[in-house]
Image: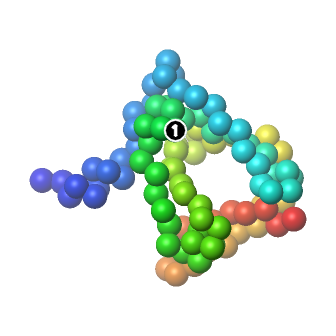
Amino acid sequence: MPDSDQQEKSLPEFDPDHCETYTASCHCGTVQYYVILSPPLPKWKVVSCNCSICSRNGYLLVYPERSQLHMKSGEEALKEYSFGKERVLHKFCGQ
């Protein structure tokens, strides 16, 4: 029987007829992107990360498929940071 935590981590099934586009940017506006979520955001499981960056900034996260994330500008300005066991790569605006 699958662990209930494992079931909660699976991504929602993408439905092109039931999706919404969300635009976002870094604070200074250099990095701009949009993400297409299906179902729309209110139906997603939101995660609170306990790393120092997320805790300090109060970030809440969703994890869409990479194919649902589209960079508009500023990808060259992104810097990288990994913590702990360095399994997760955190990208942020270096400006």
Which residue is under mark 1?
41
Crowding at mark 1 (Cα within 10 Å: few <14, some 14-19, many 20+): some
Q: x, y percentage for residue 20?
A: 58, 29
Q: Is residue 86 above or below residue 46?
A: below
Q: Is residue 87 above or below residue 66?
A: below
Colour convention? rainbow
Q: x, y percentage for residue 95?
A: 87, 65
Secondary structure at numbered mark 1: helix
**Identity of the residue furthest to the left in this view:** 1
Q: Is residue 91 above or below residue 66?
A: below
Amino acid type of disc 1? Leu
Q: Which residue does the image show at 73% across and 63% down from the upper left?
A: 92
Q: Is residue 62 left or right of residue 91?
A: left
**Identity of the residue furthest to the bottom in this view:** 84
Q: How many marks?
A: 1
Q: Which residue does the image show at 60% across and 65% down from the upper left?
A: 58
Q: x, y percentage for residue 33?
A: 73, 43
Visible residue check, residue 75 = no
Q: Which residue does the image show at 22% across and 55% down from the upper left?
A: 4
Visible residue check, residue 61 = yes
Q: Nearer the viewer, residue 39 or 89?
A: 39
Q: x, y percentage for residue 89?
A: 60, 66
**Identity of the residue furthest to the top in this view:** 17
Q: Which residue does the image show at 36% across and 47% down from the upper left?
A: 10
Q: Is residue 12 above or below residue 84?
A: above
Q: Determine the image quadrant of residue 27.
A: bottom right
